[in-house]
Image (cartoon, rainbow, N blue to C red):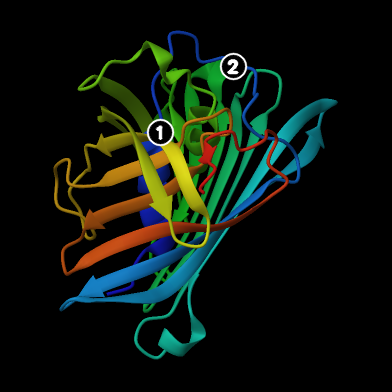
Amino acid sequence: MFKSITALIFFILLATSGEAQDCEIKSTAFQYGERVNYTIYYHLAGIWVSAGEVYFEVDSANFGNKDYYYFNSYGQTFKKYDWVYKVRDQYEAYVRKDDFTPLRFKRQVNEGSTHIREDYIFNPKKSAVYTLRQMEKDAPFVKDTIAFESCAYDVLSMIYFARNIDFGSYKEGDKIPIKILIDNEIHESYIRFIGREELKVKDLGKFNTIKFSPLLIEGTIFNAGEDMTVWVTDDENKVPLLIETPILVGSIRARLSSTENLRHTVKSRIKED
């Protein structure tokens, strides 16, 4: 029941994404050294249980005299639940700093008996992505080349690209298209902008937020549709605060637990009397 905690967070954070007219962006929403942490809760039979945690970190890298962002994320179930279903997932991505062009994406999934390894190398000049994938433990690695489309990102790069989108031009009910590379395919979907509202988050306080509902792709975790609800800080950081969604069995909630070294002051926090 705790399957794909990290994958859940990726779908969640994609709810803040939009496809811009110009995919080359200047990053203004985050900086080197930033870290955000989430606690995952599972709901069944009227009870919410804290089941796991995920973090996202930003670091730097240099290749061929070019500066890159190095994004790193790790998700796991709490050890006391490992006997039920053990999750240890890691995602890594390298993105060129000056124009946000993706360079490489790596994924290591360890979820119960599921073990997946993926390594994607991007070559935008040749409109190609070279992939190396192992979908079962001890299975051979399979090489492939897929067509690269403009404004398409791996799941981790998309999160950080999305945080630089200007949401001021969208109206309530607008659909914002997204394009993402996952499982060796590029998928097109959208998120629906619901509006803005105040939200109180346990242990963190009350915030002005932007609220969305993404169109989910049906699979082993979610039903297709717009049943997921997402709240992100309505400020320059655009950090997701709270996410709620039904899954195939029960419901999931992801709540921001802490942040480190955010680039901007959290102006969306509301002072309470």
Q: Is residue 2 above or below residue 102?
A: below
Q: Which badge, 1 or 2, comes first in the chain's sequence?
A: 1
* Distance CA(mark 1)–CA(mark 2): 16 Å
Identified at 51% across, 49% down, the residue is 273
Residue 31 coordinates in the image, percent (x, y)? 72, 35
Question: Which numbered disc covers residue 16?
Answer: 1
Helix, strand or loop under label 1: helix
Identified at 73% across, 46% down, the residue is 261
Q: Residues within 10 Å of mark 1 (few under 14, many from 20)?
A: many
Pick the residue in front: 227 or 127. 227
Q: Quadrant of residue 189?
A: top left
Callout in the foreground (1, 2):
1
Residue 135 coordinates in the image, percent (x, y)? 39, 61
Location of mark 2 (residue): 25
Q: Quadrant of the N terminus?
A: bottom left
Q: Residues within 10 Å of mark 2 (few under 14, many from 20)?
A: some
Residue 62 coordinates in the image, percent (x, y)? 81, 35
Q: Quadrant of residue 147?
A: top left
Looking at the picture, which amino acid does disc 2 mark?
A: Ile
Pick the residue in front: 23 or 140. 23
Q: Is residue 117 left or right of residue 219?
A: right
Residue at the extreme front:
273
Q: Is residue 260 visible?
A: yes
Q: Is residue 213 left or right of residue 114?
A: left
Q: Is residue 120 above or below residue 116?
A: above
Residue 16 coordinates in the image, percent (x, y)? 40, 33
Pick the residue in front: 230 or 151. 230
Looking at the picture, which amino acid does disc 1 mark?
A: Thr
Identified at 48% across, 79% down, the residue is 78
